[in-house]
Amino acid sequence: MWAELRELRDGIDTGTPPRDGPNVTLTVDGVEVSVPAGTSIMLAAAKAGRSVPKLCATDMLEAFGSCRVCLVEIEGRSGFPASCTSLVADSMVVRTQSDDLQRLRKGVIELYLSDFPSGDIPGGWSEFHTVLDQVGVKTHPYAPIDNHMDAPIDSSNPYFLFDPAKCIVCSRCVRACADIQGTFALTIDGRGFRSKVAAGMDETFFESPCVSCGACVQTCPTQALIEKSLFVGGYSRG
Amino acid sequence: MSARIFISRDSGALCVGADEVAQALRKAFEKRSLKVEIVRTGSRGLYWLEPLVEVATDKGRAGYGPVNVSDVEALLDAGMLEGKKHELGIGLVENHPWLKSQTRLTFKNCGIIDPRSLEDYKAHGGYKGLEKALAVGPKAIVEEVISSGLRGRGGAGFPTGIKWRTVAETPPQQKYIVCNADEGDSGTFADRMIMEGDPFVLIEGMTIAGIAVGATFGYVYIRAEYPDAIEAMEIAIHDARKGGVLGRGMAGSSFDFDMEVRAGAGAYVCGEETSMLESLEGKRGEVRAKPPLPAHVGLFGKPTVINNVLSLASVPIIMERGGGFYRDFGMGKSRGTMPIQLAGNIKHGGLYETAFGITLGELVDEIGGGTRSGRPVRAAQVGGPLGAYFPRELFDTPFDYEAFAARNGLIGHGGIVVFDDTVDMAKQARFAMEFCAIESCGKCTPCRIGSVRGVELMDKIMAGEDRSENLIVLENLCNTMKFGSLCALGGFAPYPVMSALTHFPEDFGTERKRL
């Protein structure tokens, strides 16, 4: 398993952690691949060279199932299960691309874009913008009224800032702070559209139990959490 | 002379003054020096007759309702205590056609017994199911429940016995029975009625479940908005422990089973089983991804049976009379009886338990008596706020899980909300999205953002702004929510919207179109 881990670290983010155990063989987009039982379809697809677009999944954290971008089709099963939380089975036949899947991914991305600033990306790259390219969606059909574009930026920490306007509530930061760092400084406060990342008892990052380890910044796919060293001059939301 | 009268303590009856009537009667008896015992029961479920006063006579219980405080003196003068005639009299309650035409299996004691008396429960056949369960053992209990065809009455309709078998087959360890009493759907009150009117049948059902799967502890998760049900369950659990039917070596057996009540905190989404588990664990009520199933990794990570109140409350009679007895009622793959809840703008609202197969039209028109307003029925929403709106053309649909699904509807928890012709279906479609937006846990994108966009789109459509373009955007949004959502809150929100657009396009200013 350690050899596999090293292989994964040098390569792509396979979306979910690797598992140990007897192998299972399945087909992803016609490509045969073998992975241990208990592995996610997402990881198997990545190993088969047929990576599925993803946002809330990262192989440093257990699958969560929040973004709904990584949906796939499984032969013999109805619906469009999330590949991060669905497990492989022997002789399973998976499709990562189809008209239906493209329509669903487009629908999800359009919803994200309806509540996202459209300016330049500090540092020039973010996972979110890579997914926009992968799915091929740059615009949305909504005339949104409710949004988070006026949410205040938390710049209290000397090393990084938090811009809630770019937050997609994927909870990667919350999960990293809990499961990787063990500090449990972050949570999601509120319900539904009002959900927001909150540090401590809804304090600033600096006042909260945050220990500035940077795990949340490292894992944030949209640069809502971003290192201050990545931009010169002031931060602009765009 | 000594007499016995029965007045409901059910919160639906309390809302219309049952306590005041009981108080007024007590005072009147004192004044007339009459020795009368007042027994507070659950409700019979004929809510248009509440507050209902029943008098024990040698022919049975005579009913009078709806009784106001101002009617008390006249009723006593007319000889109510002997069951004499009065304009509020409904005759012998058991002979009332609304009750007589029902098949009350789950609700057999509700409204009849004193819910705070374990002795009364036992005198009416209570705990015979547990006795049988202990005699036949865990494996046979599971087989009996499978053979009954009982499907989850919370709404998903999953075969209860299969769920129990899955948990029973997990290796021996701490396991749990969790009763979902969050009952958030509009027009539903059956769970509340059972908890307030016959709590011991729920306790008995959970105990049998515990024995069947090897669980030693149970939780009843009751929505915070049911304070009377919470109180009734806590009293009943306390009495059950005192009576030896809960606890270590309960009912003189080698099994341990105990339980406690936990209250929710105002979130409809916590009726979804995994977010309910999160709430029980003291965390945010966020939906968990499945797999793993709660049957394998449930409460506190342990194998857990999660069942609705009605599913568990149907188990004692299944054990007592046999799975075959229960299975004999119903149609197709929908076996047994369904406690249907008639609500909304309806003349005779209440609890109607009957075998699957009865049509929606019979329920709304004949049993429900049409609308309370007297205006024509325009639509009935079945299955809660995320259920489809059915127009009169679909009223021949039989109450059956598959028959409703075939017409893009759902039975859900059995609630029917009736609307007359003053309803604006565009407003109802907007409400579906608004409800989803308010109650969304916020974890998944299609529901968290989609529901908000859905409300905004509906506002524009209703205002006539770019109507046809926005209807296409709405259709695509509904597709995203239906197939992309993490749970049925976002997943089913499109159903009422799409059914309103399909069956009542005139309210949206469009042509009839199959969507």
Image (cartoon, coloured by chain):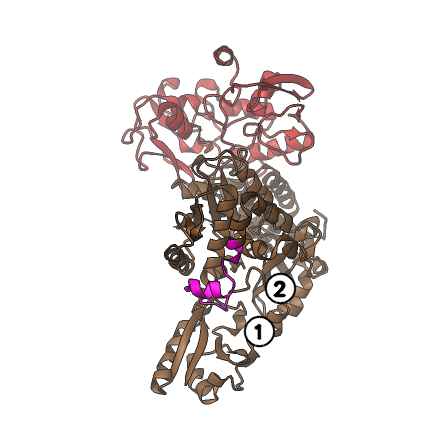
Chain colours: A red, B brown
Instruction: Please state the horizontal and vertical placement of residue B439, each as a whole percent of the image.
Output: 48, 47
- Identify which residue is drawn at 31% across, 34% down: A200
Q: Could you say which is closer to the camera, residue A226 or residue B306?
A: B306
Q: Residue at x 52, y 24 (%)?
A: A129
What segment carries the magenta color? B110-131
Identify the mark at residue B132; answer none if there is no mark: none
**Residue type marked 1:** Glu
Number of other residues with Cα within 10 Å of mark 1, as a class: few under 14, some 14 to 19, many 20 or more: some
Percent x, y of residue A167: 44, 32
Q: CA distance from mark 1 to mark 2?
A: 12 Å
Q: Is residue A59 magenta?
A: no
x and y percent of residue A135 in the render?
60, 26
* B63 shown above or below B492: below
Q: Is residue B497 left or right of residue B277?
A: right
Mark 2: amino acid: Thr
Residue B143: where, in percent of width, then height?
A: 61, 45
Q: Please name the residue shown 59% across and 28% down the image.
A: A137
Number of the label disc, if any, that sits on residue B94: 1
Q: Which residue is mark 2?
A: B103
Q: Residue furthest bottom?
A: B77
Relative to residue A221, is residue A92 drawn left or right? right
* Residue depicted at x 67% and y 23%: A91
Q: Is residue B122 in the magenta section?
A: yes
**Chain of the residue under the numbered disc 1 shown in the image:** B
